[in-house]
Image (cartoon, coloured by chain):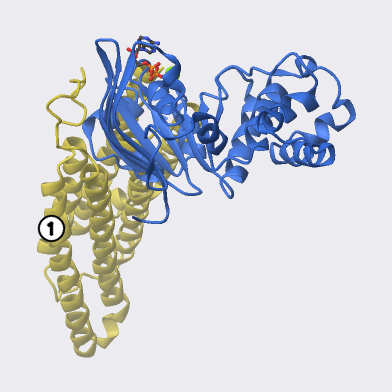
Chain colours: A blue, B yellow
Amino acid sequence: MDSSIKMAVNDLDFFYADFQALHRILLKFTSNQVTALIGPSGCGKSTLLRCLNRMNDLIPYSRVKGQVLLEGRNIYDPNVDVVTLRRHIGMVFQKPNPFPKSVFENVAYGLRVNGMRDRSMITERVEKSLKQAALWEEVKDRIHESALGLSGGQQQRLCIARALAVEPEIVLMDEPCSALDPIATQKIEELIHQLKEKYTIVIVTHNMQQAARVSDVTAFFYLGKLIEVDETKKIFTRPSLKETSDYITGRFG
Amino acid sequence: MERHLQKELESLKKYILSLGAMVEERVRKVIKAFETRDADTAGEVVNSDWEVDEFEVAVEEECLKILALHQPVAVDLRFICAVIKINNDLERIGDEAVNIAERVAYISKRPSIKIPVDYGVMAEKTEHMLKQSLDSLVNLDAGLANKVRLADDEVDDIHVENYDKVKVAIRVQPERVGSLINLLQISRHLERIADHATNIAEEVIYMVEGVIHRHKKNGYQSDSSEED
Ligand SMILES: Nc1ncnc2c1ncn2[C@@H]1O[C@H](COP(=O)(O)OP(=O)(O)O)[C@@H](O)[C@H]1O
Ligand SMILES: [Mg+2]
């Protein structure tokens, strides 16, 4: 196995009851790269993202076939512990969803769930995570105030800090900027650039320019199928397939 | 908004083609002026070069506007990049027409001289290359553009031959060295026009070769035939 491949999706099918939302997806995620998943709404981007950390397990009538290999190990093996798995693969959602607690407690939450008790270690990790999420300077004087008092963009960076606190290897982001204004969006995009030094990132975005700006690799999906995946600069200058070209140039539908 | 972009690109294409037609006409005019030693027509070409310059600026502004407002990608991005370069080549061809016109004005004022070389063939080939390069742009025809590329070598060869012939002629008629050097410069300017036509053809090839010919069976069918 190529050691730079962090995660590989191998012939993955996904069903919501009788409806097949993903068809034989084959896709590799390279370490320290940002992969963008693009495609029209309903094409299965979020479904695939949720397959990558088994968030879909929560949907009772769903079924998955095929493999998702994290460093060569199938995350769907029966003996894989889902809590441990999600510590390795963090997730950030479309709408910032801080808990109605202090800024500090939001970030510390995952650490406590994972059994960390040492007060000074937790404090250290919280500060480090907030710094990584480029939020520290803005919140260091109100770290014990409610997270709900932060702006939308700050809340989203807080959610990123929360995801980073448990030191994952992969960060999944589902349209992380869709509820944010352009300035906050720019901050998150800057952050993604910095984060890829340490993490492997998969981002779903409906904003084509954002995919072009933040990602190294772009994968285009349509009707539950992976149509084309290539280097982002290739996809946005000379895509190989007409479907991709039509979608990114807006000639679609 | 994307539909809007397609309209903008269509009108940009019309725009660059109008500039092409304008420049082509001026090349035709100056070659005619050369053949008939018509200093007045040559003067007209010199004095109206501002029209080409203004047109070039307008096309460039249009390209920048579309880039800034629509952030085009893929085939649309390649099209605009090609137009920016072709625009520049057309403006330079306009300048070369002016250069030829100035030589024509010089030669026309002096006693006629036996021309040591056949300009008819060279001028015809150059004009033809320019026409074909613009046709390849109109029809996005990479095959035709490739013919222009091949023809460029012929014009280059003719220019090299002209150089040798003029050198000999200067030895035979050293008192006419001024007119002979002007004649050689006309050969040089024609050769430069052929180079710019070749650049245009190469831009067309670049633009077309990124275009997708493959179709996937179970994908959707788009309602546009832009890339067919
Ligand atoms: N919980 C669910 N139950 C049933 N169908 C779903 C569920 N979530 C998504 N789908 C369907 O699966 C398809 C893919 O959805 P999704 O992954 O959300 O697409 P995207 O993120 O690309 O917009 C859509 O047709 C959607 O209606
Ligand atoms: Mg989604």
- In the image, residue A196 lies at what x, y percent? 56, 45
The quadrant of the rendering that contains the C terminus of chain A is top left
Residue at 39 percent of width and 28 percent of height:
A38
Output the chain of dot 1: B
Instruction: Residue B193: name its quadrant.
Output: bottom left
| Picture layout, residue B9 above or below residue A4 | above
Residue B223 in the image, given as x and y percentages of width and height: 20, 17
- Could you classify mark 1 by the number of other residues whose Cα lies within 10 Å: few (under 14), some (14-19), or many (20 or more)? many
Residue under pointer 1: B125
Residue B87 shows in the view:
no
Which residue lies at the image location 13% right of the left edge and 67% below the top edge?
B154
Q: x, y (%) of residue B115?
A: 16, 73
Left or right: B172 in relation to A129:
left
Look at 37% across and 20% down and name the residue there: B2
Q: Is residue A135 visible?
A: yes
Quarter in which the N terminus of chain A is drawn: bottom left
Type of amino acid at the residue the image marks with label 1? Lys
